[in-house]
Image (cartoon, rainbow, N blue to C red):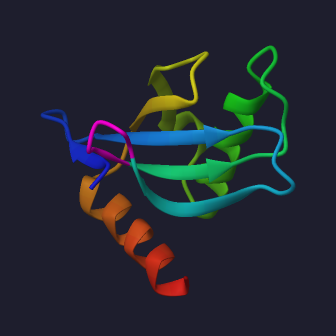
Amino acid sequence: MPAQATSAGDTRLSVRLTPRASRNRIEGLVSEADGSSSLKVSVTAIPEDGKANAALIALLAKSWKLPKSAISIIAGQTDRRKTLLIATEAQEIHRHISLLSRKS
């Protein structure tokens, strides 16, 4: 799973972001070349001046009913592959991800 609990009770989440998509959506899990998995997310925003990153945070916060301040990008600010720190338990993120796979 792309979500891992931290010692502080937060969650680290690996994300693969696709900017300039036709619509904003959380697409589900995707396998990376290194064998790890990430949550694939598409946003319509362009990857300039942090607009795509802001759209990513807004989409996840709205979908998972979290405040935007609970989600921060800790790695990959200018990369497609990002690591997010989310101020909630890993079990809650796993639940949201498993609901995505049921809808597919």
Residue 38 on the magenta span: no
Of residues 42 and 89, the one nearer the viewer is: 42
Q: Principal SS element in the magenta part?
A: loop
Of residue 10 and residue 94, the one placed in the foreground of this image is 94
Residue 68 lies, with reference to residue 66, above or below; the image says: above
In the displayed structure, does residue 43 sit left or right of residue 97? right
Answer with left or right where residue 103 lies relative to residue 54: left
Q: Residue at x 61, y 50 (%)?
A: 41
Front residue of this view, candidates 27 and 11:
27
In this rendering, does residue 94 appear at all? yes
Quarter of the image holding residue 74?
Answer: top left
x%, y% of residue 1?
26, 56
Place of residue 89 in the rendered image (x, y in percent of width and height, measured from the top left):
27, 53
- Residue at coordinates 42% horizontally, 66% vertically from top-left? 97
Give the answer, above or below, for where 32 lies relative to 65: above
Quarter of the figure that contains the C terminus: bottom right
Magenta residue check for 34: yes
Q: Residue at x 58, y 29 (%)?
A: 80
Which portion, as a residue range, is magenta? 32-37
Residue shown at the point (57%, 17%) measured from the top left: 77
Instruction: Give the x, y percent position of residue 42.
Output: 69, 49
| Left or right, 92 with reference to 81 | left
Extreme-front residue of the structure: 33
Residue 64 appears anywhere in the view: no
In the rendered structure, the answer to whether residue 6 lies left or right of residue 96 reads left
Question: Count of labels shown?
Answer: 0
